[in-house]
Image (cartoon, helix red, strand yellow):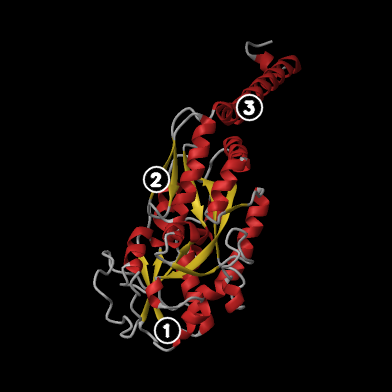
Amino acid sequence: MPVGCDVCCPSFATTVVRQLARTRTIGSAVAVALALVSVGRPAAMAQGYPTAPVKLIITTGAGAAPDVIARIVAEGLSRRWGQQVFVSNHPGAAGSIGMKVAGTAAADGYTLLFALSSSFVALPEIAKDYPFDLVRDFVSIGFVCEQPMAIAVPPSLGVGTLGELIDYVRKRPGELNVAVLSRGGIPHLTAEWIKLAAGLEWTSINYPGAPAGLADVIGGRVQVIMDGLPSLAGAINGGQLKLLAVGSAKRLPNRPDIPTIAETLPAIPRALGFFAVMGPPGTPKPIAKKISDDLRAVLSDQATQKRFEDIASYVNPMSPAELLAYIRTEQALWKPVIEQISTFQTAPKDAPRDPPKTAPKDAPKAEPK
């Protein structure tokens, strides 16, 4: 047999096939092992998570109603984890600034987004070309709470109910200004919805944070304020503001004497802010589940629930699927309102310090106390 002829022999061919099969088997085993390692790594990371401080990004300024809620959540998670959870404020552009910061963060659980209802409801409608979609791109972790909108005025305005305010504005078309927090946010949308439902003419003035808006309303430079109840509660309890109505579906148990907006304007069944914790795109499921379980434990604490209820914020645990269904319901509620708002007026960077030119000339003066 010539040298090299054995490569053509059946016995040699069989040996080669066996060697190739063995190589494939080893390769497959390595591939499986690598896959198991890649799957197991996030699970192992989740068991010891977190080992460093966690950043909770919020899309409003400090002192606003959502900021109050975020800090309660951060405090509870910090205690549970033994690691600091710190709130990082990134206000502006209907939440898109903060969403971009969170959306481009590392997907390792150490940056989270405290998402506002406006980012779910308004942003998809007013910024259709925005690259991030909360439902599509981010990882759902947990629902935090609902919070009714509140409409209030300084006592010097001389109105005691939402109906009286509507009559007051109708007699002075275009003369009143409404302080709202965040362009395109739920407070802004609620002010616009009341304007549409009641046929009013007033101007929504956007403020970067609640303190500036409160200062101008309490000082009489702006006549009405719309925000989540927590950021107004101190001024209301202190007598500096008169609470006219809330956006809950029914009267609040801790403020049963305050009517809902729907009692005066049935076309507005509810006007609620809501909050959810989301992970950046690609956050591993084991880590997301760990955070979700710990968040639920924090929100199940009776003392924490009492803190929420004291500021008219109500815990409402939901699974990710239930959260998505809830979001779709709210999107359907607000979409017609957003479509009717032709412009989103933005206040100057410095809040007005002089009485607006459109301020009512005959506004009643405060009685001396």
| Dot placed on the residue nearer the N-terminal end, 1 or 3 | 3
- Name, please, the residue furthest toward the bottom: 171
Q: Single out the mark in the foreground, 1 or 3.
A: 1
Tell me the amino acid under the disc marked 3: Leu
Q: CA distance from mark 2 to mark 1?
A: 36 Å
Q: Look at 72% across and 18% down and name the residue there.
A: 18
Residue 176 rendering spot, x and y as whole percentages: 37, 79
Q: Secondary structure at mark 1?
A: loop
The residue lying toward the viewer, choosing from 128 and 260, is 260
Say whether residue 212 is visible: yes
Residue 36 numbered mark, or none: 3
Query: On the rendered image, what quadrant is the N terminus found in?
Result: top right
Question: Which mark is first along the chain, 2 or 3?
Answer: 3
In the image, residue 221 above or below residue 94? below
Q: Amino acid at mark 2?
A: Ser
Location of mark 2 (residue): 88
Image mark count: 3
The disc, 2 or 1, on the residue closer to the chain's N-terminal end is: 2
Give how far across and how far down residue 124 sits, in percent: 50, 64
Residue 201 — which label? 1
Say which element carries label 3.
helix
Q: Would residue 294 be found to the left or right of residue 57 on screen?
A: right
Q: Residues within 10 Å of mark 1 (few under 14, many from 20)?
A: some
> Where residue 199 appears, x then y in whole percent?
49, 85
